[in-house]
Amino acid sequence: MQRVTAQLVAGLLAAVLSLLSEQSWADGGGPSLSERVIWAVNAGGEAHIDVHGIHFKKDPLEGKIGKASDYGVRLPILRSSPEDQILYQTERYNEDTFGYDVPIRDDGDYILVMKYAEVYFAQSQQKVFDVRVNGHTVVKDLDIFDRVGHSTAHDEIVPFSIKKGKLSVQGEVSTFNGKLTVEFVKGYYDNPKVCALYVMKGTLEDVPKLQPHPGLEKPEDEEEEEEDSEVGEEGGKKKVQPDSKYRVQSGPRTPNPYAADNSSLMFPILVAFGVFIPTLFCLCRL
């Protein structure tokens, strides 16, 4: 009897220890954010370690492709922590399509994070370009100013996965040869650019969020309606216009002064009566 009791106690202790171990992993016992980042570059700038411990390397394209610019260092960047503003103040741009090659050896789920800030142009439709990943267009017609305004941090986040020699991104699949090529594609409006970028293992929930933008915040009920509108009848996603999704709010909507005015509806009725009664009177006299 004592042996059975001892075995039960040992089993319970093992189960408790296992649960504690799993909880510790979930609470941060797993790899940190910086450990999951496999590649990071401060485009057009020097090496930098951000507040999350991510080590951004000095731009490897320096002296090879495009031009580096630190024009943004004279400006404070909204939505970014003071320690990491340099990641949005420097940039690399080119008069033609350019990009970076990221070596990836292991299968798994990954996230590509690209950092931007518009520090030169003061209106939309001045710099617009696409982003491709291994030939797949993952960002179409990126207009940074149109998204967030001037001197404001903006991250483009692209999840993708690699499994058995195949790259899957945004519903498209292609052969993967161990190298992720991120390209910034020349468009009709000025030159493509990027401020910083990194690739990490994980999911969208693992990506650090920027500080909120007052002009981009929306009521919770509006966000729920938008999420519902993205899902079709059979679970397929409907396309949401980017203009309505990212439009900066400039103030409360002005009420319609004619919303409660029904005089426009009564006018045709009065005219009809005015024509009908004399006509009826004439017909009766005949």
Image (cartoon, rainbow, N blue to C red):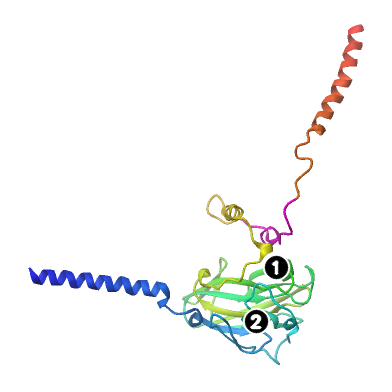
Q: In the image, which disc is placed on residue 148?
A: 1
Looking at the image, can residue 140 be seen?
yes
**Number of dots carrying numbers:** 2
Q: Position of residue 39 (x, y in %)?
A: 55, 84
Quick one: label 2, few (<14), some, or many (20+) residues within 10 Å?
many
Q: Amino acid at mark 2?
A: Leu
Residue 166 shown left or right of residue 222 in the figure: left
Q: Position of residue 186 (x, y in %)?
A: 74, 76
Residue 78 drawn above or below residue 214: below
- Decide which of 118, 100 is in the foreground and name it: 118
Quick one: label 1, few (<14), some, or many (20+) residues within 10 Å?
many
- Tell me where residue 124 sits by quadrant: bottom right
- Decide which of 106, 220 is in the foreground and name it: 220
Residue 208 shown left or right of residue 191 in the figure: left
- Tell me where residue 191 sits by quadrant: bottom right
Instruction: Assign a secondary structure to mark 1.
Output: helix
Q: Is there a contact, CB below 8 Å, between mark 2 and mark 1?
A: no
Please give the name of the residue rendered at 8% of the width and 70% of the height, measured from the top-left corner: 2
Please give the name of the residue rendered at 69% of the width and 58% of the height, measured from the top-left corner: 244
Q: Position of residue 206 (x, y in %)?
A: 51, 72
Magenta stretch containing residue 188, yes or no?
A: no
Q: Position of residue 75 (x, y in %)?
A: 74, 79
Residue sitting at the far top: 285
Q: In the image, which disc is placed on residue 87?
A: 2
- Tell me where residue 277 sits by quadrant: top right
Magenta stretch containing residue 249, yes or no?
A: yes
Residue 180 drawn above or below residue 147: below
Chain-order first, disc 2 or disc 1: 2
Please give the name of the residue rendered at 79% of the width and 42% of the height, measured from the top-left corner: 257
Looking at the image, can residue 286 be seen?
no
Q: Which residues are the magenta region?
A: 238-253
